């Protein structure tokens, strides 16, 4: 299979590198010229093991060749990334997004057509170590399904290809519920960490931040319910409580973004939940406050 991965960051290199190692023809696309040259020269290195991959700046890769295009920019950059790179897709090819946040699937569908989009989630943990290097600590999974809900053979063939590449992937018809569950989880711990500078364990140790986490979960679950998505609130509360205890030293990506002076994914996470709450007339004061404060930090750190 010919694969184009748009966004050669931590996750793009993880998926691209593993698909290349499994024998697929992979090219990575990124706006960062230094990263593109490093990958082109030395390939992608995951935990010290390298595999060669071609890398290109947007607009310079061969067009109309990819059977699968994976978007792995931050959600903030999904729209420009798909607009700049949709021409890489061959007729009949599909685009996959397992980025965090709400709205990535619809943004991509607007460019390539809803029946060419697969959506999902992943919880693989990957960190950038250098321009062509990543560190993966532990394992994760991928769940995916078609954006329009149809059961098509391509959903299963892409899940199988990712599974064969060692990414622990499955086709999951109830992927919308999984996407919302992950967004609520991220809105909770990522947001509080980014606003306070606390690690996940510290959030759990401090009673007001622990209580705020559970309040954010309750607001998120209410928004999902009003949007027609069934979420098991107890399951989300348990996974937050598990993270507070077992991922104590973890610095969520939104905190890493703030510390590095990058824009956060607030628009696709807390902001998208608040917009959905407004559509359904639900009051979500905790989420609304977190979203406003995060947007303030973004405006200070990385003006649009
Ligand atoms: P990252 O910042 O490491 O990588 C994003 C890359 O996209 C960067 O290299 C950037 O230069 C590139 N980019 C930006 N605009 C582009 C464009 N127009 N065209 C091509 N490339 C462009 O981010 P990441 O950690 O790999 O995360 C990607 C997505 O996966 C996010 O939605 C994130 O929340 C999600 N995610 C990350 C992890 C993780 O452990 N890192 C886990 C699960 C989900």
Image (cartoon, helix red, strand yellow):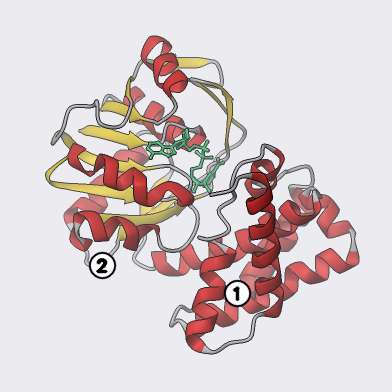
| Quarter assignment of residue 130 | top right
Residue 156 appears left or right of 233: left
Q: Residue furthest bottom?
A: 281
Residue occupied by mark 2: 148
Q: What secondary structure is marked by label 2?
A: loop
The relative height of residue 79 versus residue 45 in the rendered view (above or below) is below
| Quarter assignment of residue 59 | top left
Residue at 85% from the left image edge and 52% from the top image edge: 202
Residue 211 appears left or right of 2: right
| Residue 159 visible to the viewer | no
Give the crowd class for mark 2: few <14, some 14-19, many >=20 residues within 10 Å: some
Of callouts 2 and 1, the N-terminal one: 2
The location of residue 209, given as percent across then percent down, is 83, 64
The CA distance from mark 2 to mark 1 is 23 Å
For the residue pair 303 and 43, the one nearer the viewer reads as: 303
The relative height of residue 208 versus residue 80 in the rendered view (above or below) is below
Residue occupied by mark 1: 220
Q: What secondary structure is marked by label 1?
A: helix
The location of residue 213, given as percent across then percent down, is 74, 67
Give the crowd class for mark 1: few <14, some 14-19, many >=20 residues within 10 Å: many
The relative height of residue 278 versus residue 123 in the rendered view (above or below) is below
The location of residue 73, given as percent across then percent down, is 44, 42
Residue at 63% from the left image edge and 63% from the top image edge: 187
**Circle number at residue 289:** none
Residue at 29% from the left image edge and 39% from the top image edge: 161
For the residue pair 141 and 61, the one nearer the viewer reads as: 61
Quadrant where the image shows the N terminus: top left
Q: How many marks can you see? A: 2
Residue 3 appears left or right of 296: left
| Residue 41 visible to the viewer | yes
């Amino acid at each position: 299979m010919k694969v184009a991965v748009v966004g050669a960051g931590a996750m793009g290199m993880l998926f691209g590198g593993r698909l290349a190692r499994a024998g697929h023809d992979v090219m990575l696309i990124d706006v960062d010229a230094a990263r593109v040259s490093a990958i082109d020269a030395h390939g992608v290195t995951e935990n010290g093991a390298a595999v060669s991959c071609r890398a290109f700046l947007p607009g310079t890769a061969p067009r109309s060749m990819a059977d699968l295009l994976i978007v792995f920019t931050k959600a903030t950059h999904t729209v420009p990334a798909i607009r700049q790179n949709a021409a890489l897709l061959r007729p009949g090819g599909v685009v996959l997004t397992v980025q965090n946040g709400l709205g990535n699937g619809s943004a991509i569908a607007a460019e390539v057509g809803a029946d060419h989009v697969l959506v999902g989630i992943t919880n693989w943990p990957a960190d950038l170590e250098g321009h062509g290097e990543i560190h993966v600590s532990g394992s994760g999974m991928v769940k995916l399904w078609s954006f329009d809900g149809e059961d098509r053979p391509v959903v299963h063939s892409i899940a199988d290809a990712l599974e064969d590449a060692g990414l622990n992937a499955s086709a999951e018809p109830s992927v919308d519920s999984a996407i919302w569950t992950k967004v609520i989880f991220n809105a909770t711990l990522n947001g509080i960490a980014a606003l306070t500078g606390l690690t996940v364990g510290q959030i759990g140790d401090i009673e007001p931040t622990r209580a705020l986490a559970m309040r954010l979960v309750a607001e998120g679950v209410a928004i999902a319910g009003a949007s027609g998505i069934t979420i098991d609130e107890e399951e989300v509360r348990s996974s937050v409580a598990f993270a507070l205890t077992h991922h104590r030293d973890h610095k969520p990506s939104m905190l890493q973004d703030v510390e590095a002076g990058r824009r956060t994914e607030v628009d696709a996470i807390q902001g998208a939940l608040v917009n959905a709450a407004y559509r359904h007339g639900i009051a979500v004061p905790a989420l609304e406050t977190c979203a406003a404060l995060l947007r303030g930090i973004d405006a200070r750190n990385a003006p649009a």
